[in-house]
């Protein structure tokens, strides 16, 4: 097992660090932004849960943007859409906190009722390929 940033341990079966964080930065509640067409479109495009990962990792999995991936952790598994973001480091993926049900399904310690905020280990595989 390997510790990354002191937050989680990865292993051969769970090589990715899954990071729960807000992907929207609060713009959806800012009154100055609510009328912006581009931001409204972004909010509706990704109503379904999604995972953010680097383009290189998506390519290695043979999954395109918008395709589905299976995320597997010690706690559970879920199939969700993929979005790519060049700013995500290798072997790291982001689970937006705007979809708390997915995080509660996947994160250890979620049974407390609180939304986990610490990174946790998982595996990601293609559920649908190019």
Image (cartoon, helix red, strand yellow):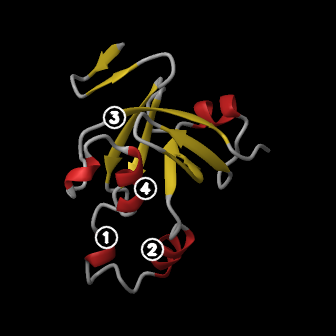
Residue at the extreme top of the image, as rendered: 1
Q: Alpha-carbon distance for marks 2 and 3?
A: 30 Å
Q: Quadrant of residue 98?
A: bottom left
Real-space CA distance between mark 1 and mark 3, rounded to the nearest whole angstrom: 26 Å
CA–CA distance between discs 4 and 2?
A: 23 Å
Q: Residues within 10 Å of mark 3 (few under 14, many from 20)?
A: many
Left or right for 64, reference 18: right
Q: Which residue is mark 1?
A: 27
Residue furthest out toward the right = 130
Tell me, yes or no, whether the two marked residues, 2 and 1, touch with CB atoms within 8 Å: yes
Q: Compared with residue 98, is residue 108 higher up or lower down, i.e. above or below?
A: above
Report if residue 69 is visible in the image. Answer: yes
Which residue is labeled 4 in the image?
102
In the picture provided, is 95 more to the left or to the right than 81?
A: left
How crowded pointer 4 is (Cα within 10 Å; few <14, some 14-19, many 20+) is rated as many
Disc assigned to residue 39: 2
Mark 4–mark 1 Cα distance, whole angstroms, equals 22 Å
Q: Which residue is mark 3?
A: 120
């Amino acid at each position: 097992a390997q510790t990354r940033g002191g937050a989680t341990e990865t292993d051969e079966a769970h090589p990715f660090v899954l990071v729960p964080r807000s992907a929207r930065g609060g713009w959806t509640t800012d009154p100055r932004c609510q009328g912006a067409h581009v931001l409204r479109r972004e909010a509706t495009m990704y109503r379904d849960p999604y995972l953010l990962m680097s383009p290189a990792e998506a390519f290695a999995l043979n999954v395109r943007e918008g395709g589905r991936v299976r995320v597997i952790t010690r706690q559970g598994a879920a199939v969700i859409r993929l979005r790519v973001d060049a700013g995500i480091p290798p072997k790291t993926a982001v689970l937006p906190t705007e979809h708390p049900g997915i995080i509660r399904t996947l994160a250890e310690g979620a049974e407390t009722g609180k939304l986990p905020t610490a990174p946790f280990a998982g595996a990601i595989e293609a559920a649908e390929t190019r």
